[in-house]
Image: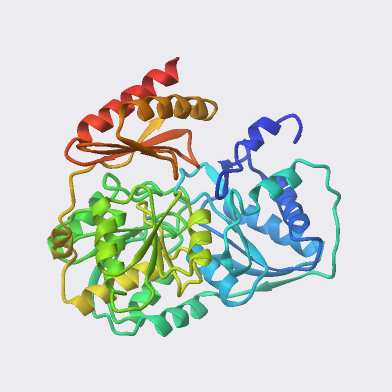
Amino acid sequence: MLQKNKTNLEEVFKAYDIRGLYKTQIDENFAKKLALSLTYYFGLKQLKIATAYDVRESSKELYKVLNEEFVREGHEVHALGLVPTPLFYNYIAGYGMNGGVMVTASHNPPDWTGFKLCKEKAEIIGEGSGMETIKSNFFQDIKPIKVSEGKLLEVNAENYYINFLSSHVNSPLNYSVCIDIGNGSTFSIMPKICNSYKMKCELLFPEPDGRFPNRPSEPTDETLTKLKEIVKRGSCPGAAFDGDGDRLVMVDEEGNVVRGDVLFALIAKGYENYDEKRAIIEVNFSEAVEYFLRNMGYKVYISRVGHSFITKEMIDKSALIGGEISGHYYFKETYGADDSIFAFVKVLETLKKLKISIKDFIKELNLPPSSDIVAVPVVDSAKDYIMEKLKAYYEKESKKVIEIDGIKAYFDDGWVLIRKSNTMPQIKVKAEGYGYKRLLEQAIKLIDELSKS
């Protein structure tokens, strides 16, 4: 089966996780072979390994197969069950696991599934940090092996995580807030956190349901209509999480979705009085946010998009905070891993400390005009060709091109960033500056033309 469908299966190994269509690409046999590939990757020794899964209808069965295979191979499996991804990361680092596997396709549609892979200290296994080896193992004829006597420990990670939060962010926060669970994996932990911080929380769509019947798994300006209505009516902050709970999107007191780099700037403000401030940001961030960070005394490093890249930078640079415009936030306190729930309580703590609203903080930033990130559909096989042609075009037509992640071309009236999606058949475009509309439209037109050639 593997040889017959190898091309189809190779596509699921992404830059920082594994994602594909359930049954069509990823099934129970895939999960079993993946577990064996990880055992070979870690050197054929007994591991302490954490496993968890999200709310998708396919996830629990794949999780069970992983657990059974890991135990058969002789590992000590700490089975966390259905939890948000931040709890999974936190447990791996906090309890000294050798690694872990989270069954999730994050914010992708319901018919997708996948795996997030970690090594010790919750460092992501991705491109350049082990994914290539695991992929190679997967497609080799590796033999089943038993390294020791395995055992399965079912673990409740929620209490440990709540204690972890309280050790870093003091109660009470005394906020009224509306939280859109989106039928996702934060359904159990968020009411407990609100209670522990003495917050009055209204929960939207709190029932776990991997079909995501009330809104798509990905929280965006278009999908958070109900949350925005409630927040605007109550003049309180709002928060939303994606399906596996590793992305946070917040809504200001007037019902406007807050851009990820702007929310990051607010989080950074809460650490203003710290010494040795280092921040990891990605290429989509506004230059205004970068200047804001530098003016507060941060040393700023710019990274590729993706949690495996930013987590590695967090560890290598001993950074205080890191962020992605898509709603991933990384902290020294969380061992360099991204943690949307920790970000949520840090935002509220900062607002309380500064005695400011989100909307007033945004006004102070004085952001230049910019576009949203626009995803242009492109088949995976055409991405490299299109990017090569775009590079040649922009090197000729722009003032400067940088290639930290994709192509970022600078003009007198702004910049445009064009980069391949690591998880979907898309090329993503964002532009900033007074000429952003022209730059965005031009880039999209070029991509469309090249995709047809």
Q: Is residue 389 above or below residue 409?
A: above
| Residue in view at x 16 percent, y 76 percent | 355
Horizontal side of 411 relative to 156 (left or right) equals left
Q: Is residue 83 visible?
A: no
Give whichever of 296, 108 is nearer the camera: 296
| Residue in view at x 75 percent, y 40 percent | 139
Horizontal side of 441 relative to 8 (left or right) equals left
The quarter of the displayed image where residue 252 is located: bottom left
Q: How many marks?
A: 0
User: x, y percentage for residue 216?
Assistant: 38, 46
The scheme the figure's colours follow is rainbow
Q: Is residue 200 above or below residue 1?
A: below
| Residue in view at x 45 percent, y 72 percent | 332
If the image is split into quadrants, where does the N terminus sit? top right
The quarter of the displayed image where residue 353 is located: bottom left
Horizontal side of 27 relative to 349 (left or right) equals right
Give whichever of 330, 347 is nearer the camera: 330
Horizontal side of 418 relative to 21 (left or right) equals left
Q: Is residue 77 visible?
A: yes
Give whichever of 247, 43 is nearer the camera: 43
User: x, y percentage for residue 176?
Assistant: 22, 73
| Residue in view at x 19 percent, y 54 percent | 256
If the image is split into quadrants, where does the C terminus sit? top left
User: x, y percentage for residue 368?
Assistant: 18, 48
User: x, y percentage for residue 208?
Assistant: 44, 59
Q: Is residue 147 above or below residue 172?
A: above
